[in-house]
Image: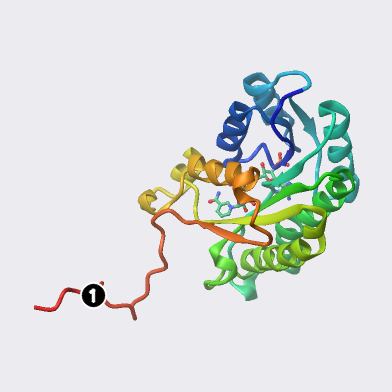
Amino acid sequence: MSDGGTFLITGATGQVAPATIALLAKRGDALLLTGRNEERLAELERTYGEPGRIETFAADVTTEQGAVGAAEAAVSRLGRLDGLIHMVGGFGAGPVFMTRVEEYDRLLRVNFLSAVCATQAVLPHLDGGGRLVFFGSPLASEPLAALGGYAAGKAALTAWMRSLSHEVKHRGIHANAVIMTMADTPQARQERSHVDFDHAVTPDLVARVVAFLTGEGADGLYGSLVPVMGKFGFSSALAGPPPRKAG
Ligand SMILES: NC(=O)c1ccc[n+]([C@@H]2O[C@H](COP(=O)([O-])OP(=O)(O)OC[C@H]3O[C@@H](n4cnc5c(N)ncnc54)[C@H](OP(=O)(O)O)[C@@H]3O)[C@@H](O)[C@H]2O)c1
């Protein structure tokens, strides 16, 4: 066992997670890393695995059963649980008239209902308080064209998280969300070669905010949406240039 916190990281197989795993592991936390992709879990096990401190576990936390299994595995393998870092998410774009209802179902399940399942599974184990960290998008409050399904999934997530935070704060449980723009990852650079990644955020910058939200520095935060936007900004043809000095 470590002296740090003990966290379940769901969606640990994703693009943003490795920097967070590395930073929390260095801090001395104990971590159960979950995802469905067993090949990726095996890589994480090889890189970070340490029996009883950093372990991997295959689970689909978009289902209640998968989420309960992940939370129980965290407690049985690591001895206790202090919180959840919920990195499961999924993107999808397309205009309304070309997007099937099944795609809306997928986006709501992966971005919103997965958080409900994971949180319901973890809460019974947080007797001594805890930390819950979710991942939203600025598109939830600025929903651009053809991104309605994704924006709705993230908007549902953040509205629900803020409601949840009121329910659990008196138990010493802090629920907060990182609101991040596009991550600068090798996969994103490959898929979007036309994009200026100076406007993106690195997974390392995100990891530092997750470390903050899972540490005492965030003792005063309940239901916060913490923007980690790097130099990103929505541009608009209506916006003029920055103001200049007179004369
Ligand atoms: N990357 C970005 O630019 C960006 C921007 C804004 C917000 N975010 C949010 O930040 C979080 C982390 O981002 P990320 O880029 O690391 O995410 P990601 O790589 O796209 O996905 C994270 C994990 O979610 C799981 N997942 C995806 N679809 C699923 C499904 N239908 N059912 C169950 N699990 C599914 C996958 O794990 P398995 O396949 O192993 O189960 C995947 O490894 C996500 O919530 C994301 O929405 C990311």
Does 119 sit above or below residue 137?
above
Position of 164 with respect to 184 (left or right) is: right
Q: What residue is pinned by disc 1?
A: 243
Provide residue 187's location: percent of width, then percent of height: 51, 41
* Residue 58 appearing in the image: yes
| Residue drawn at the location 78% of the way across and 63% of the way down | 164
**What is the quadrant of the C terminus in the image?**
bottom left
Q: Is mark 1 on a helix, strand or loop?
A: loop
Does 212 sit above or below residue 168?
above
Position of 92 with respect to 131 (left or right) is: left
Which of these two is toward me, 3 or 46?
Answer: 3
* Residue 102 appearing in the image: no
Crowd around label 1: few <14 · some 14–19 · many ≥20 (10 Å) = few
Does 65 sit above or below residue 24?
below
Provide residue 226's location: percent of width, then percent of height: 56, 58
Type of colouring: rainbow
Q: Which residue lies furthest to the bottom in this view?
A: 238
Which of these two is toward me, 164 or 155?
Answer: 164
Q: In which quarter of the image is residue 163?
A: bottom right
Provide residue 240's location: percent of width, then percent of height: 28, 77
| Residue drawn at the location 62% of the way across and 67% of the way down | 151
